[in-house]
Amino acid sequence: MSALMKQLLAAFVLAGLVGAVFLLRHQAGGTAADGQGLDTEESLRRYGFHLREVSKEIRIDFTHQAPTLDAKLDHIMPIIASMGAAVSIVDFDRDASVSWCPTSRAARQPKQPYGHRASSAPPRGETRP
C-alpha cells in the first residue's frame, strides 16, 4: 500500500470518528455540555451516579487565578496557567479528619483550608498536641 493510500485511509477514519461524535450528539438530543443537564434519575440510569454543585452551600468560595508573568510569555500563558491549580489533602489540625486546601498560581492569593473544623486550624508554623 502506498504512502498516499495510507494517508487517505487515515484521513477517512479520522473524518468518520469526528462525524460519529456529531451524529451521536444529535441523536442524544443534547447533553449537559449544551447547558441542558440531566435530571437526577436520568443521570443515575445512564452513569450510576449524579453530581450537583454544592460549593456555595458549604461556604467554599475559590476561584483559580492565573499567574502574571513576563509579557514575552503571553503566547503560552494558557498552557502555563493550566499547570498550577491543585488541592492539598491533609489532616492539618491532627483531629483524624481530612481537610483540604485549594491552591492557585497567583501571587499572594490567600490559602483557605476547608473541611472538618477548618476554621480551628492553628496559625502557620504552630502545631496542636
Image: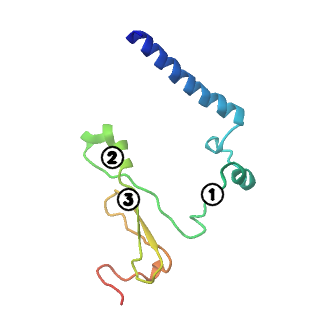
Q: Is residue 22 left or right of residue 84?
A: right
Q: Which residue is mark 3?
A: 104
The number of numbered discs placed on residues in the rendered structure image is 3
Q: At 48% across and 16% down in the image, what residue appears?
A: 9
Element class at badge 1 = loop
Element class at badge 3 = loop
Q: Say which quarter of the image contains residue 28.
A: top right
Query: Considering only vertical position in the picture, is 10 above or below 108?
Result: above
Q: Position of residue 124 (x, y in %)?
A: 32, 78
Q: Earlier in the sequence, mark 3 or mark 2?
A: 2
Q: Residue furthest front?
A: 1
The answer for how far apart the CA atoms under marks 3 and 2 are is 12 Å
Q: Position of residue 19 (x, y in %)?
A: 59, 25
Q: Which residue is mark 2?
A: 80
Which of discs 1 and 3 lies nearer the camera? The answer is 1
Name the amino acid type tagged 2.
Answer: Ile
Q: Earlier in the sequence, mark 2 or mark 1?
A: 1
Name the amino acid type tagged 1.
Answer: Leu
Q: Which residue is mark 1?
A: 51
Quarter holding the N terminus is top left
Q: At 57% across and 70% down in the image, what residue appears?
A: 58
Element class at badge 2 = helix
Q: Say which quarter of the image contains residue 54.
A: bottom right
Q: Residue furthest bottom?
A: 129
The answer for how far apart the CA atoms under marks 2 and 1 are is 29 Å
Q: At 67% across and 54% down in the image, what residue appears?
A: 48
Q: Position of residue 23 (x, y in %)?
A: 65, 28
Is label 2 in contact with label 1 (beta carbons under 8 Å)?
A: no
Nearest to the observer: residue 28 or residue 10: 10
Which of discs 2 and 1 lies nearer the camera? The answer is 1
Quarter holding the C terminus is bottom left
Q: At 44% across and 69% down in the image, what residue appears?
A: 100
